[in-house]
Image (tube, grey):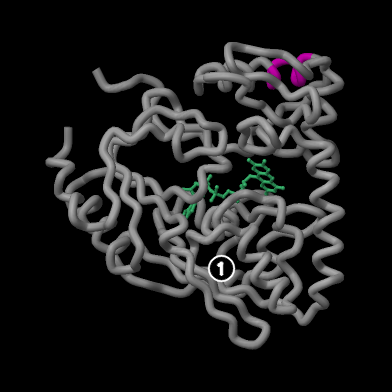
Amino acid sequence: MYPDPSIFADVAPVVLYHEPMAKHTTWRIGGPADILAIPEKISEIAKLLHLAISNGIPYFVLGRGSNLLVRDGGIRGLVIKLGESYSGYVIDGNELTVNSGRTIVSTANVAMKNGLSGLEFATGIPGSVGGAVVMNAGAHGNEMKDILQSVQVLTPSGEVESRSAKELNFHYRTSALRDSGEVVLSARFSLAKGNTEEMLAKVKGWSQRRQATQPLSFPSCGSVFRNPLGDHAARLIEAAGLKGTRIGGAMISDLHANFIVNVGHASANDVMALMEYAKQQVLLQFGVELMPEVRLVGEDEARG
Ligand SMILES: Cc1cc2nc3c(=O)[nH]c(=O)nc-3n(C[C@H](O)[C@H](O)[C@H](O)COP(=O)(O)OP(=O)(O)OC[C@H]3O[C@@H](n4cnc5c(N)ncnc54)[C@H](O)[C@@H]3O)c2cc1C
């Protein structure tokens, strides 16, 4: 292996070794990360990144793990988890600046309580601010790119830089940040004045609709496949007759066909086999090639 992983031991308040990623993903699936660190400050994030890069140790930035399939062999190297302990925010007029570890749901709630409108669409998205920006998360016809003004990033060479929304090349569920190696430290949103009661009423309606149409009582990653142009992955998978299809502990939800739910000890291999089967069937029956929305990371095999 690479150098002694204990070099990370004192860099962040929490540093875990051989940590099951299943504990850190909403699917409750994923093999162990060699090292998982949970920093609280920019200086700790910078030191973790520097130590990893200068020692040739691969690193991966984790938000809330709500759009990730971690393979059963786990993740080699360092996982930097930006969560609860890195979630401060500042409001300045109509601008809300938030550290990337805060959930996008609680960020939207802060905005609404302070009479700021624009983030309501995100109240059903269980990711972090960092993950939501990187994935250009969206719902109800809105996306992060509509309200994001800029982000602060830590570059692999250790500089803290600002990037305007324009520079981030946002597209459907992706951005230039996805494979840049940069860590999103914070995001600045440009919001509008709004009426708190009206906003809360609107999101209550959306929440009821989600409860009725999505299998929220089972672990999942939300939508597994991207919607093909002009169609919906869920419609195609349902029309292929695949609702309820099960491999191991993974099942295509009978409520929403673009959700694969963990109905009991599903492995990443179960999910990948089911994704492959759904892909094949939709291609065979409708000639449409489904592409994953969920990010697949890690190794197939555990280290021997
Ligand atoms: C029940 C359910 C419903 C969902 N509904 C929606 C929906 O309506 N719309 C939608 O768009 N998505 C939805 N999702 C998917 C998911 O919540 C979003 O994609 C979310 O934005 C992912 O954020 P995360 O923090 O969990 O990211 P993670 O899954 O942890 O990571 C996703 C990617 O972002 C990167 N990343 C995360 N944080 C950082 C950071 N600080 N710096 C650099 N890179 C980072 C990771 O490296 C990875 O590449 C849903 C998921 C679930 C489980």
Residue type at tag 1 = Glu
Q: Secondary structure at mark 1?
A: helix
Q: Is residue 263 magenta?
A: no
On screen, residue 218 versus residue 43, left or right, reads right
The image shows residue 225 at horizontal and vertical percentages of 68, 34
Q: Is residue 225 visible?
A: no
What range of the chain is rendered magenta? 278-284
Front position in the image: 141 or 176: 141
Q: Is residue 279 magenta?
A: yes
In the depicted structure, whether residue 158 falls above or below residue 56: below
On screen, residue 230 versus residue 59, left or right, reads right
* Residue appearing at x 34%, y 68% in the figure: 42
Q: Quadrant of the N terminus?
A: top left
The image shows residue 44 at horizontal and vertical percentages of 28, 63
* Secondary structure predominantly adopted by residues drawn in magenta: helix
The image shows residue 52 at horizontal and vertical percentages of 24, 50
* Residue appearing at x 41%, y 59% in the figure: 182
The image shows residue 214 at horizontal and vertical percentages of 77, 36
On screen, residue 50 versus residue 280, left or right, reads left
Rendering quarter of residue 272 = top right
Give the tally of numbered discs. Answer: 1
* Residue appearing at x 30%, y 44% in the figure: 78
Task: Check disc 1 and report the residue beneath it.
Answer: 167
Quick one: which residue is furthest to the bottom in this view?
A: 93
**Neighbourhood count class around disc 1 (C-alpha, 10 Å): few under 14, some 14–19, many 20 upward:** few
In the depicted structure, whether residue 207 falls above or below residue 45: above
